[in-house]
Amino acid sequence: MCRPRPWVIVPGIWNSGPDHWQSLWQDERSSDGPGSVVRIAPASWTEPDPDDWSRAISRAVAAVDEPPVLIAHSLGVLAVAAWLGQRGHAEVVGAFLVAPPDPLAPGFPAAAAGFVEPVAQAAPEVPTRLVVSDDDPYCAVDRAIAFADVLGAGVVRVGALGHVNVASGLGGWSAGRALVTDLERTI
């Protein structure tokens, strides 16, 4: 059996708490040893600065031994989309993006105003899945699907799971973990 690809965890604004599926997955993956999972560490969790988050993604990707899979949630999705657009694709092998927020929606945090919706990339080269909830209060389904089209990402609709976070009652979100496994099989 092959060693699993490392992961870079890219949470949303304020980071993901200990009960969030990203944190639970990180704890689980950490048992695979050093370098198996790295979480970004921007200085601007509460007043997110896109450049700071981009540098944090670059540092996290550089901290693993081989190109990782990016695992992003919420504002982290916008950060990853921007990073991929700036950096190219050779540094990562996949992106699993969950519950993007819509920067044009009324509920978008004012503190994150520097983040923008994804922009088209010439030729998306990174296998990418965008997970969309049918009742996400931060992004309408049609907007999320439009983001996926721009990114060249496959869309996975997961039904009514809110913002796919702790409030959604997902715990370790085993169904999401299975989606990552499916993505990793295509890499």
Image (cartoon, helix red, strand yellow):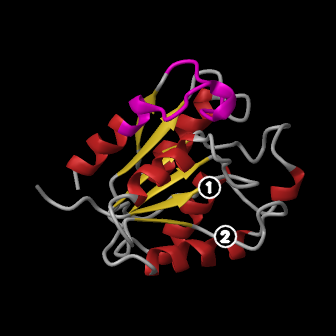
- Secondary structure, mark 1, is helix
**Total number of numbered labels?**
2
Which label number is shown at residue 165? none
Report crowding for label 2: few under 14, some 14 to 19, many 20 or more residues within 10 A (C-alpha): many
Task: Give the main secondary structure of the magenta stretch.
Answer: loop
**Of residues 49 and 153, which is closer to you in this image?**
49
Q: Secondary structure at mark 2?
A: helix
173 inside magenta stretch: yes
Closest to the observer: 11 or 147? 11
**Does residue 3 appear left or right of residue 139 in this picture?**
left
Q: Is residue 64 left or right of residue 15?
A: left
Task: Please name the residue that numbered disc 2 is placed on.
Answer: 53
Query: Whole-Å distance between the Cαs marked 1 and 2?
Result: 8 Å
- Residue at which label 1 appears: 76
Name the residue at the left extreme. 1
Vertical relation: 58 (above or below) 72 = below
Residue pictured at 33% horizontal, 78% vertical: 65
Q: Quadrant of the N terminus?
A: bottom left
Q: Mark 1: which amino acid? A: Gly
Give the amino acid type for the residue marked by disc 2 in the picture: Trp
Residue interval drawn in magenta: 159-177
Give the position of the C terminus as an image quadrant. Answer: bottom left
Residue depicted at x 71% and y 69%: 50
Residue 125 part of the magenta segment: no
- Specify which label sits upstream in the sequence, 1 or 2: 2
